[in-house]
Image (cartoon, rainbow, N blue to C red):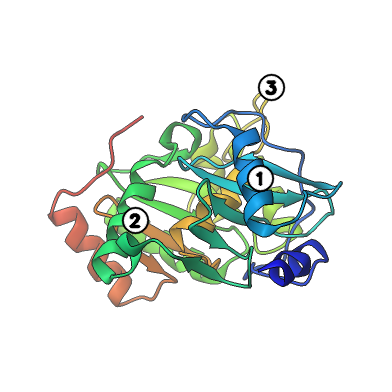
C-alpha cells in the first residue's frame, strides 16, 4: 500500500492516454455537493500511512464523495479516492481498485456508472444544440481524428450533446479553453472541428476560466480510468470509448429513436 503512494508521489504513475498539458491553477467553482477536504485528507493519510507532502493537495471532484490527489508539478496526472478509501484510482497501485462488494459485479459497475452520469455538472459543460434533445455527453478533443468522425455522425443525426472539451496535447487543451470561454462555445466547437464557419465562436467571455482539472476528471470517471478520446455517454449510463463509422452511428440512432436524453440546463 505505502509503496504505491510513494510511487505516485515520486511521479512513477502515468494514467493519461493523451499528452498532459501544463497544469492549470485549481478550478474556482465549488462542487455541487458538500465536501469535507479535511476529513478526506485525514482518511487518506491514515489509510496510506503517510502524511501529505508539500507540493500535493487534495481537492473535491464534481462527483459526490470522490476526491482528487493533485500535484503542483506541471504535467503530473491526478490520482483519485473515495472518502472511505474503499475505492481508489492510481493511489495504492497503478489502475483502478475497489473493495466495495456492491461494485464487484457487472450490474454493480453499471449502477456505479449511472450514478456518476447523474452527478455530471451539465450546467458547466458546453451545450451544442442541434435538432434533437440532448442525447449524450461527449468527452472530446479538437486534435483527435476519431473525435472528428464522431462530430460528423452527430451533425448527420442532428444530435444535441453536452461537450466536455479537452486535448490530446497542450495545443489541443489551448483550443478547448478558447472554445469553452468563447461567447458562442457551440459555434466555436463546431468551427474547430470543421463542422461550422471558420470564424465561429466570437470573442472570449470576460472573466471566463477553463476548468482544466474538472474536464480531465470527468473523462477519467466516464472512461472508468481509460482516458482515450472520444468518450460518449448516454443518459442510461451506457457509453462508447472511441468511435467508428458503423457501430457508433447505429447506437446513436438507437438512442435518438428511444428518446433517451439528458435534461436541458
Q: Which residue lies furthest to the left in this view?
A: 258
Given this view, does label 1 or label 3 mark the residue nearer the observer? 1
Locate the N terminus and report the quarter of the image it occupies. bottom right
Q: Evaluate whether residue 160 shows in this view.
A: no
Q: Name the residue under label 1.
A: 212
Check the image and report above or below for 252 versus 178: below
Q: Mark 2 points at which residue?
A: 112
Residue for point 59% across, 58% down: 142
Query: Residue 27 placed where, x, y %?
Result: 67, 35
Of the image marks 1 and 3, the number of the one nearer the N terminus: 3
Callout 3–callout 2 Cβ contact below 8 Å: no
Q: Splitting the image into 4 quarters, where does residue 64 fall? A: top left
Could you give the CA–CA distance between mark 1 and mark 3, rounded to whole angstroms?
Answer: 17 Å
Graded by Cα atoms within 10 Å as few (under 14), some (14 to 19) or many (20 or more), the crowding at tag 2 reads some
Residue for point 52% across, 45% down: 83
Q: Name the residue under label 3.
A: 206
Amino acid at each position: 500500500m505505502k509503496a504505491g503512494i510513494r510511487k505516485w508521489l515520486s511521479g512513477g504513475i502515468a494514467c493519461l492516454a493523451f499528452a498532459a498539458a501544463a497544469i492549470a491553477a485549481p478550478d474556482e467553482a465549488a462542487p455541487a455537493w458538500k465536501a469535507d477536504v479535511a476529513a478526506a485528507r485525514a482518511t487518506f493519510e491514515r489509510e496510506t500511512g503517510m502524511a501529505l507532502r508539500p507540493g500535493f493537495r487534495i481537492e473535491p471532484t464534481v462527483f459526490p464523495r470522490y476526491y482528487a490527489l493533485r500535484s503542483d508539478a506541471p504535467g503530473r496526472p491526478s490520482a483519485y479516492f473515495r472518502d472511505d478509501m474503499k475505492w481508489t484510482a492510481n493511489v495504492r497501485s497503478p489502475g483502478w481498485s475497489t473493495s466495495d462488494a456492491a461494485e464487484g459485479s457487472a450490474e454493480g459497475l453499471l449502477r456505479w456508472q449511472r450514478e456518476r452520469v447523474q452527478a455530471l455538472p451539465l450546467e458547466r459543460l458546453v451545450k451544442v444544440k442541434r435538432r434533437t434533445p440532448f442525447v449524450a455527453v461527449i468527452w472530446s478533443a479538437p486534435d483527435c481524428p476519431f473525435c472528428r468522425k464522431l462530430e460528423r455522425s452527430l451533425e448527420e443525426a442532428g444530435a444535441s450533446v453536452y461537450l466536455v472539451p479537452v486535448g490530446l496535447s497542450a495545443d489541443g487543451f489551448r483550443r478547448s479553453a478558447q472554445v469553452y470561454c468563447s461567447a458562442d462555445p457551440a459555434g466555436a466547437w463546431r468551427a474547430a472541428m470543421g463542422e461550422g464557419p471558420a470564424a465561429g465562436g466570437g470573442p472570449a467571455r470576460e472573466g471566463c476560466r477553463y476548468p482544466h482539472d474538472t474536464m480531465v476528471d470527468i473523462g477519467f470517471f466516464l472512461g472508468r480510468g481509460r482516458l482515450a478520446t472520444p468518450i460518449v455517454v448516454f443518459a442510461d449510463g451506457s457509453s462508447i470509448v472511441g468511435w467508428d463509422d458503423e457501430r457508433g452511428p447505429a447506437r446513436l440512432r438507437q438512442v435518438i429513436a428511444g428518446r433517451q436524453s439528458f435534461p436541458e440546463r
